[in-house]
Image (tube, rainbow, N blue to C red):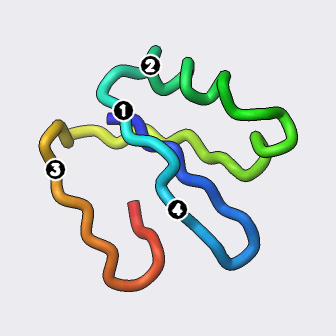
Amino acid sequence: MFIIVATKGNWKWVSGVFQAEDVARQYMDLIPDELMGYQEFIEVEDIAYPFLYYRASGISI
């Protein structure tokens, strides 16, 4: 599973969740250069669709 997390100041959000790395990379290619510095590409092993994402406080991946 590949997750793209964006962070800007005190704000943090999940920008995308993808099963395939190539699709996640294609999505990253669509992000404008001036916003790319806010993005983080994360690979999470041992997780598959469907999954539950629960946010109690902040983001934890």
- How far apart in space, not on screen, are marks 4 and 2 (Cα)? 19 Å
Residue 18 locus on image (x, y percent): 36, 32
Residue 50 locus on image (x, y percent): 13, 43
Q: Which mark is residue 51?
A: 3
Residue type, label 3: Phe
Q: If you read the primary sequence from the N terminus, does the residue marked by circle 4 or circle 3 appear first?
A: 4
Quick check: marks 4 and 3 in contact, CB under 8 Å?
no
Label 3 crowd (10 A; few <14 / some 14-19 / many >=20): few
Vertical side of 7 occupied by 19: above or below: above
Please tell me whether mark 4 sits on a helix, a strand or a loop. Answer: strand
Q: What residue did someone put label 4 on?
A: 13
Q: If you read the primary sequence from the N terminus, does the residue marked by circle 2 or circle 1 appear first?
A: 1
Label 1 crowd (10 A; few <14 / some 14-19 / many >=20): some
- How far apart in space, not on screen, are marks 1 and 3 (Cα)? 12 Å
Quadrant for the N terminus, please.
Answer: top left
Task: Quadrant for residue 31, please give it.
Answer: top right
Please tell me whether mark 1 sits on a helix, a strand or a loop. Answer: strand
Q: If you read the primary sequence from the N terminus, does the residue marked by circle 3 or circle 2 appear first?
A: 2
Residue type, label 4: Trp
Vertical side of 3 occupied by 18: above or below: above
